[in-house]
Image: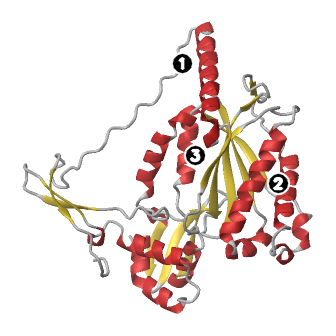
Amino acid sequence: MSELADIFRDYGPAYRQKFAEQLLPSHRVAMQAIEQCRTAAMGGHVYDCKHCQATDYSYHSCQNRHCPKCQQQSTEQWLARQQDFLLPSRHFMVTFTLPAQLRTVVRSNQKLLYNLLFRASAAALQQLARDPRFVGGQIGMIGLLHTWGRNLSFHPHVHYLVPAGGLAADGQTWLPSRHNFLLPGEPLSILFRAKFRDALKKTKLFNLVPAQVWRQSWVVHCKAVGTGQQTLDYLGRYLFRVAISNQRIEKLQNGRVTFRFKDTATAKTKRCTLSAEEFIRRFLQHVLPKGFVKVRYYGFFSPGQRQTLHKIRQGLVALQLATAQAQSTPPPAPNPSPAAPEWTCPQCGRPMRLVGTLAPQKQGRPP
C-alpha cells in the first residue's frame, strides 16, 4: 500500500519544478518533511535484542503538523497538556463554515482570512451567549481550524468546543445552559455573517466577493458531544487529523492516486482517483501558513483567565460530588495516563535495548 510520502518522493520533484514560481515556502517545507519522515535522512536510534540477536532501527519523526505519520503521538501529548481545561460538564461542538463563493478569495489570502474567520465566529458566539435568554454569561471556547472536505476539497471551517454553561457577571455564579441546547443556530449564523462582512469591508478583498454571499444563509451547526475526557478525546482527534491519512490511500499506479472517503450525505464509502499532480495540489492547499496558530482559546479558557477557570472547575467538581453523594453513586474516576511504550523486538516480541544513535543526513534523497 502506498503512502503520502511515496507520492511526494515519486512525483514531488516534477511538481516542484513545474510550479516553482507559485509554490509557497511552507509547501516546500511540508513536502520535504513528509518525504523524509522516519527514514535514515532524519537520523534515529539502533536497538538490539539480547534474546534473538536481532537489530532494529527507529528513525526520527519529522514533527511536521501536516504529516500523517506524526499526528497520533501529537494527539496523545496534546491531550496530556489539556487536563487543566477538563470541566465536569456537558459540552457542545459549534461549527462555522464559510460559503463556497468565498473560498477562492480565502485560498489566495489564507493567513488574513483564517484569522478573520476565527475573530468573527468567536465574537458571534460570545455575544449571543451573553444574552440572558440563552446562557446569560461568559462562555469558554477552544477553537480549531479545518480546511478540507473528505475528498480533499477546500472547505474552510472552525470547530469550537464549548462547555454547557457560562460565568455570570458577578464572576462567581455558574449558569448552566438548557438541556441539549446551547444557542439558536439561525441568529448565530446571521451574527457570524455580519461580523465577517464588517471586518472584510476594511480590506481590499471585499470587492472580490459576490454580493449574493451577504444575502444567503451561512452554515452554523451546534451539537452535544458528551462530557469530560470523552470531549477532549473528541477534540484531539479533530485537532491532529491531517487532510488525508495513509490508511485512506489505496493505490498509486501509472501516475494516478486512488483514495477512499466517506460521503457526508450518504455515509457510504466512495473512491476518488486523481492524477498525482492534482492529488499533490489538493493536499498542499491545506498546508497552513508558517507560524499560523490553528487552535485558539477564548473566554474563561483564554490564557489570562486561568485563575477564573480554576475556580469554575472547583465549583463544578463540588457540585458533582454533592450530587453523587445525594444519589449514593461515586463520581467517575479519571482515566489513567497511558504508560510509555517499550521498543519491542519485531522477531520475538521482547524488549530491546538502545545501543547507538544515527545522525541525520545533511543532504540527499531519503532511501
- The numbered disc on residue 192 is 2
Residue 339, image x, y percentages: 32, 38
In the foreground, 17 or 52: 17
- Badge 2 marks a residue whose secondary structure is helix
Residue of label 3: 235
Whether tag 1 and tag 2 are in contact, CB under 8 A, the answer is no
Question: Where is the C terminus found, in terms of image quarters?
Answer: bottom left
Residue at x 72%, y 42% (from the top left corner): 223
255 in relation to 327, above or below: below
Mark positioned earlier in the residue sequence (2 or 3): 2
The residue most toward the front is: 304
Residue at x 78%, y 55% (from the top left corner): 120
Residue at x 78%, y 52% (from the top left corner): 220
Residue of label 1: 331
Whether tag 1 and tag 3 are in contact, CB under 8 A, the answer is no
Mark positioned earlier in the residue sequence (1 or 3): 3
Drawn side of residue 143 relative to residue 1, left or right: right
- Badge 1 marks a residue whose secondary structure is loop
| Amino acid type, residue under disc 1 in the picture | Pro
| Amino acid type, residue under disc 3 in the picture | Leu
In the foreground, 75 or 254: 75
Drawn side of residue 2 relative to residue 178, left or right: left
How busy is the neighbourhood of tag 1: few (under 14 within 10 Å), some, or many (20 plus)? few
Residue 285, image x, y percentages: 60, 73
